[in-house]
């Protein structure tokens, strides 16, 4: 009789996981807390606590179903602290004849598991069925497309699922209501407070453990309030549908100096852990429109994030790795600005985004794209340095979702696969979409001078530096036409202003590859002995 060890990863906390179906009676289910997974980048303590608490609750649910579970806690004395070796140790301990695991969320683990498939204790890899599409589905859609676009993929997904469709036509006559979803907060109602999840004894023990082992990492554990059970995740979904979704669409691009959540959901982390399924979330949002409780622009914008964007970035990740991770189309090489760890910057928008990240392991998508991301893009921060930071500090950052968004959308380092143009902006954008500027010492209306917003000169300096790869982009031609109309004296003044700012910008050194750090190279998609480019 087959006796497999079923390895369940921290982002696979779903009872319908492929590796949990058709279990032999002798199967042993293993969940492993290992220090290696908490440290290959310095993950935010709240992110680590969320995952470990969710894993421990899920293990209890499996035991309640009568399944045999072996749980390796972080402080178990014989824990090997490495996922592969710990799984193999447990398999030998229980006399298992193979290890089964569902596709992980990171290429480095996928490669590590695949390397063990033909070993003396074979690993069997199963496809993850919890998404709308598989990597093979996405590869089939991509075949023959010279310039794949998210919008085209999203429409195909709508047709395939029937979500917000009337036959073969989109409900309301439009596929995309993004133009209706760009309002600042000027006339918005007060954002509701998110639900509270009081830590139980399991979560309290995890918080103490994480504080002891990972307390030196960036981020605060105080105020931890992430859902760590399916019941808590369902409460988050119900709260979003009732209190936030009606206003989500119109204000999803707005930024607040004081309110981190606004009308956004806090569902991404629960989705990525497996506590919620994308199907149940999208279908629940669709019902809110069909039953008249939420407007179409809000529901369509929300469903597009899950059915379109989330599936697209995952497909792009799995069909383009490991080469994708080495993309650096604009040749960026600056280290990460030190303020990303300290919050010590006079740019109010940047400081508040970093402070919210520190306090909550969260910043919403426009803060990531147009504040921390835009600043890094304009300053020429290396993709590797910024990708490491995003992966470390956000509770919802799995590499399959983080990497295409950071490297591709934020930094345009993939040459246009994620976005047809760089998402670069001056201080005028921040002034229009937020209330930060009224609290800032810099003036978003000034281009040069002591009180000029640095984003303004950095923006034009970025365009001047990258004229060759960007000027012929159809979506950039009007911008470059404006740059061409500037006098030589004005361009020189902008250059001096930007370069003086960059010269004074304290940065961490880019990661060093010397010294044979093969483990770190492998985490970044490099095979042993390969030289980064």
Image: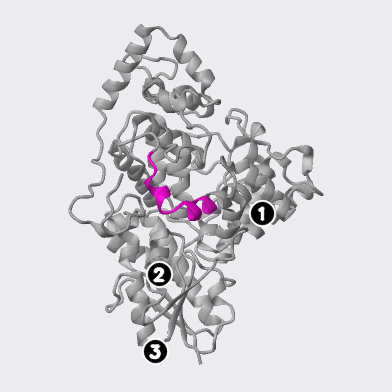
- Helix, strand or loop at mark 2: helix
98 lies above or below 200: below
- The residue that mark 1 highlights is 282
- The residue that mark 2 highlights is 113
- Of residues 236 and 472, which is closer to you in this image? 472
The residue positioned farthest toward the left in the image shown? 515
- Helix, strand or loop at mark 3: loop
313 lies above or below 413: below
Label 2 environment density (alpha carbons within 10 Å; few <14, some 14–19, many ≥20): many
Q: Which residues are magenta?
A: 314-328
Locate residue 165, reporting x and y percent: 77, 48
Q: CA distance from mark 2 to mark 1?
A: 32 Å
116 lies above or below 253: below
Residue at figure coordinates x 50%, y 15% from the top left: 481
Residue at figure coordinates x 60%, y 61% from the top left: 277
Residue at figure coordinates x 39%, y 49% from the top left: 325
**Residue 7 part of the magenta-drawn span:** no
**Residue 315 part of the magenta-drawn span:** yes
In this rendering, the label closer to the viewer, 3 or 2: 2
Residue at figure coordinates x 37%, y 76% from the top left: 87
- If the image is split into quadrants, where does the C terminus sit? top left
- Residue 189 is labelled as none
Label 3 environment density (alpha carbons within 10 Å; few <14, some 14–19, many ≥20): few
Whether residue 510 appears in this view of the structure is yes
Whether residue 200 appears in this view of the structure is no
- The residue that mark 3 highlights is 95
Give the side of residue 31 with respect to residue 20, left or right: left
- Of residues 344 and 378, which is closer to you in this image? 378
Give the side of residue 428 with respect to residue 252, left or right: left
- Asked if the residues shown at circle 2 and circle 1 are in contact, with their CB atoms under 8 angstroms apart, the answer is no
């Amino acid at each position: 009789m087959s006796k497999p060890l079923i390895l369940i990863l921290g982002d696979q906390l779903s009872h319908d996981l492929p590796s949990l179906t058709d279990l032999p009676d002798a199967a042993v289910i293993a969940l492993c807390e290992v220090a290696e997974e908490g440290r290959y980048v310095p993950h935010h303590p709240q992110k680590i606590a969320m995952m470990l608490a969710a894993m421990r609750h899920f293990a209890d649910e499996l035991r309640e179903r009568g399944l045999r579970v072996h749980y390796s806690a972080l402080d178990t004395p014989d824990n090997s602290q490495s996922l592969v070796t710990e799984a193999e140790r447990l398999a030998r301990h229980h006399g298992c004849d193979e290890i089964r695991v569902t596709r992980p969320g990171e290429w480095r683990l996928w490669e590590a598991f695949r390397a063990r498939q033909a070993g003396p204790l074979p690993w069997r890899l199963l496809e993850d069925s919890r998404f709308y599409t598989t990597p093979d589905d996405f590869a089939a859609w991509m075949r023959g497309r010279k310039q794949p676009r998210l919008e085209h993929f999203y429409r195909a997904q709508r047709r395939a699922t029937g979500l917000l469709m009337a036959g073969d036509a989109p409900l309301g006559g439009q596929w995309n209501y993004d133009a209706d979803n760009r309002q600042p907060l000027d006339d918005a109602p007060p954002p509701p407070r998110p639900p509270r999840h009081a830590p139980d004894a399991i979560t309290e023990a995890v918080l103490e453990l994480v504080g002891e082992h990972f307390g030196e990492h960036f981020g605060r554990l105080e105020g931890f309030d992430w859902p760590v059970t399916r019941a808590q995740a369902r409460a988050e979904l119900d709260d979003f549908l009732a209190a936030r979704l009606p206003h989500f669409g119109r204000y999803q691009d707005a930024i607040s100096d004081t309110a981190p959540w606004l009308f956004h959901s806090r569902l991404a982390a629960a989705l990525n852990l497996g506590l919620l399924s994308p199907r149940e979330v999208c279908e629940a949002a669709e019902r809110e429109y069909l039953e008249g409780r939420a407007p179409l622009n809000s529901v369509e914008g929300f469903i597009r994030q899950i059915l379109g964007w989330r599936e697209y970035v995952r497909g792009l990740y799995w069909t383009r790795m490991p080469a994708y991770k080495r993309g650096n189309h604009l040749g960026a090489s600056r280290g990460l600005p030190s303020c990303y760890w300290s919050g010590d910057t006079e740019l109010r928008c940047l400081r508040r985004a970093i402070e919210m990240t520190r306090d909550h392991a969260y910043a919403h998508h426009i803060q990531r794209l147009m504040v921390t991301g835009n600043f890094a893009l304009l300053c020429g921060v290396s993709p590797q340095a910024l990708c490491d930071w995003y992966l470390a500090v956000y509770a919802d950052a799995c590499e399959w979702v983080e990497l295409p968004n950071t490297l591709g959308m934020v930094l345009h380092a993939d040459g246009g696969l994620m976005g047809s143009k760089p998402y670069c902006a001056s201080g005028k954008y921040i002034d229009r979409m937020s209330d930060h500027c009224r609290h800032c010492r810099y003036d978003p209306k000034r281009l040069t001078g002591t009180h000029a917003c640095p984003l303004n000169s950095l923006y034009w300096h970025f365009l001047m530096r990258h004229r060759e790869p960007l000027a012929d982009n159809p979506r950039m031609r009007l911008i470059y036409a404006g740059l061409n109309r500037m006098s030589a004296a004005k361009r020189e003044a902008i250059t001096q202003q930007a370069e003086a700012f960059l010269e004074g910008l304290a940065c961490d050194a880019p990661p060093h590859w010397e010294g044979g750090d093969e483990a770190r190279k492998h985490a970044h998609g490099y095979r042993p002995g390969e030289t980064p480019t």
